[in-house]
Structure formats: structure tokens, C-alpha cells
Amino acid sequence: METSHDIFIGNSRSLSEIEDDGVELVVTSPPYPMIEMWDDLFFSLNADIETSLDDGDGRRAFDLMHEELAETWEEVERVLVDGGIACINIGDATRKVDDSFRVYQNHARITEYFDDMGFEPLPDILWRKPANSAAKFMGSGMMPPNAYATLEHEYLLVFRNGKQSREFPSGNDVRYESAYFWEERNEWFSDVWEDVRGTSQELTDADTELRDRSAAYPLEVPYRLINMYSVYGDTVLDPFWGTGTTSLAAMIAARNSVGYELQEKFTEVFDAEVAGVAELAHATVSKRIRDHEEFVERRLEAGKEFKYDAENYDFPVTTKQEKPLQLYTIDGVEQTESGYAVTHSPYNESESIDGDAGGHGQATLGSQFQ
Ligand SMILES: C[S@@+](CC[C@H](N)C(=O)[O-])C[C@H]1O[C@@H](n2cnc3c(N)ncnc32)[C@H](O)[C@@H]1O
């Protein structure tokens, strides 16, 4: 199997390289309106945003920032197939403007835009970041009533383009091959993710200062979403690509990807990570298999039985749907005119090396955020 990963440097308000209905999934995290680290970027897109903040008009600045994002959301609607899913990672912002402290609810505003465009909101996922410091309550004091809660979660908003789900012919092989394990389903489709950390990935020698400036999300976030909402052969779009974490996850999950990013410098981080992506894919897939084998062992020890056997692997599975499940690793990566082409081959169980897949001390998706 071969997948392509295209990167375009430019403003995603025009996704001109993508035809109508050209992608099956969108996974992205835009700059967060009213979070100070993104002020300069929004000012460069519309000078009135800076004037509004200078005038102490937080509401207008918030509206204008969302109007900038909305231009991209309209393009997303054009290029996403009917029934395709858009997953938007966004956090709300707390901010004091003109002596008034308040929360700016980015998740609500984005939901409104997608609803207005004809998308159907689906249950979202709260991604809860670790709360490990008493310092987070600094300044809130011990007396009611003027303290406020600390924001420790972000949203993974999920929208379907239109009323109907995507249709597949019955018995569609690719859809069955793309199945995930029953126990993964139970974890991934839970509405609160507490086990995914928001720290940097430290996977490679990639420039960490650049990565911090990009506010990259952990690889586990797009990797799960891609497995949950797309099948092999699909194309995943990230219109706010940053350092390309979505494309890296798409490579590992054996899907195609396309990204748009304003700041060319971020491609340096991506290029450094692509250099190690074959190892990372191998480590990730063997860990998924190992985790499944441990799950099987635990259930058998607890006296439970399995009714089905995987067709491509030497272990049982919980449901009939998992039987044809097939995972892929990466054989090779080549640079192309617009990004990368990746060759994948089916992952064989014998490739799993006792607890240290890849054997190079490479972090895996499941362990890197502890
Ligand atoms: C929150 S970051 C995305 C981080 C990314 N998920 C990652 O893991 O690296 C948002 C990115 O969107 C980019 N951006 C903002 N507005 C854009 C636009 N209109 N078109 C293309 N890229 C844009 C910013 O430069 C920034 O890199």
C-alpha cells in the first residue's frame, strides 16, 4: 500500500489544491482565539483585531478572530465528503480585557459555525490535561464568591458533514481491515480522555523551541481520531497543520494526508520527525498488538472465553467485526514534489520483539506522555 502526504504553505482560507469532496476526514487544531500566544498571528490577518483589543473591546476581538477561522471552515465544508467527519481540537480562553475577566468560549462559537453550515454535531470528547500543581489556584484565595475554576480540559469537537453517515457497500473489505480492537473502542470512544498528556513529544531531535511555538498536540490525539473516523485509502486534511502532527499520525495509521500551514519554518520539525517515522510506526503497531495480547491473557485468566479468532493474527478477538483487522507498518518514505510518499506493508505478529519493538529505545505512542 502507498500513501501520499502533501503539504502546502499558504492560508487555508483557500484550499485550492483540493477538489470538492476531496477528503474524507478533517483533524485539526486552529490557533485559539483570545489566547495571547496567537494574538500576533490574528493581528497579521486582520488589523482591526489589534485595534479592538487596544480599545478594550474583547467581544469584538473574539468575533473577528472567529471570522478569520470561519473562512477556513467554509472551505472545509466544500472539500469534505458528505458524511465525512471533522474533528476540531480547541480550548476556551480566560482573559482580562479592559478590567473585565471572563471566559471566551471558543468551543461554543465553533460549534455554532459548523451547525450553521449544515454539519451535525456529534458527542464531543473532553481531553483532560494533567492537574498536578497547587499553583494553578494561585490568586484565587480562600474566600467566596469571586474565585473561578481553572480550565484543565480541551475539547475535541466532532461534526458530521450533513445528516447521513458515509455509505460503504456491505462487506466492504477496507472498512473491516481498518477495524480497531474492542478494548480500544471502549477507551477511544469514552467522552473524557485523561490518559493523553499535553506535553511535547520528544520523539526525535526536532527543534523543541519551534515545537513549543506551534502548540503541537500529542501524536496520540490525531492517531486515535484517524483510526476512529477513517478507513485505509482515506485522506485526512489538517488546514492548521503546524508541525504536521496530523500527517505524522496519518503516516503511522496508513492513511493519506494533506496539510496547509502559514509558517514554512514548522516543516523543519516535521521533516525531522519523518526521518524516524518507520521506527515509530513499528513501535506503535507492535505496542497495540502487545496490549491486545495482554488483554486476552487477563480475560482468559479471569475465566472468560473468546468466540472469534483474528484472520491475520494468531490471537483471539472479542467480536466478529475485529476478525479481518489488519495493521500496517512503514517500509519506506520518499520525498515528493509536494511532501512525502510512504510505502506500507501488512504487519506480521513475528515482527513484535519482546516489549521493545524497534529495539532502538524509541518512545511509543502509548508511553511517551507519562
Ligand atoms: C494550534 S497550531 C496547530 C498545531 C498542530 N496541531 C501541531 O501539532 O503542530 C495552529 C497552526 O495554524 C497555523 N495557521 C493559523 N491560521 C492559518 C491559516 N489561515 N492558514 C494556514 N495555517 C494557519 C498557525 O501558523 C499554527 O501553526
Image (cartoon, helix red, strand yellow):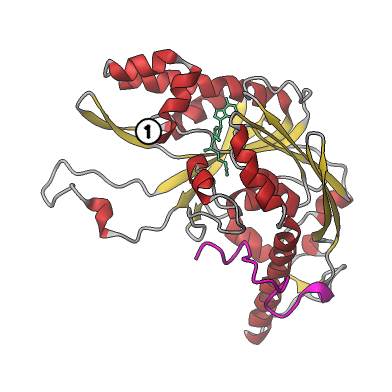
From the image, tell me which residue sits under label 1: 36
Question: Residue at 13% across / 52% down in the picture?
Answer: 142
Q: Is residue 282 left or right of residue 219?
A: right
Q: Give the class, few, some or many, for how many residues have Cα within 10 Å of label 1's Cα (few <14, many ≥20).
A: few
- Mark 1 C-beta to ligand 1 under 8 Å: no
Determine the secondary structure under disc 1: helix
Residue at 60% in and 42% down: 243
193 to the left or right of 238: left
> Which secondary structure is most common in the magenta stretch?
loop
Ligand 1 falls in quadrant: top right
Q: Is residue 352 magenta?
A: yes
In the image: residue 101, left or right of residue 283: left
Tell me, yes or no, if residue 227 can be seen here.
no
Q: Quadrant of residue 70?
A: top right
For the question of whether residue 359 can be seen, the reply is yes
Residue 214: horizontal and vertical position, in percent? 52, 41
Depth order, front residue of 280/75 = 280
Q: Residue at x 62, y 66 (%)?
A: 363
Q: Quadrant of residue 247?
A: top right
Figure check: 163 above or below 357: above
Q: Position of residue 146 (x, y in %)?
A: 16, 41
Question: What x and y, as percent, mark residue 282?
Answer: 75, 64
Where's residue 307, x and y in %?
78, 74
343 in relation to 64, above or below? below
Q: How many marks?
A: 1
110 to 244, vertically: above or below: above
- The amino acid type, in three-letter code, at marker 1 is Glu
Q: Which residues are magenta?
A: 349-370
**Nearer to the camera, 266 or 299:** 266
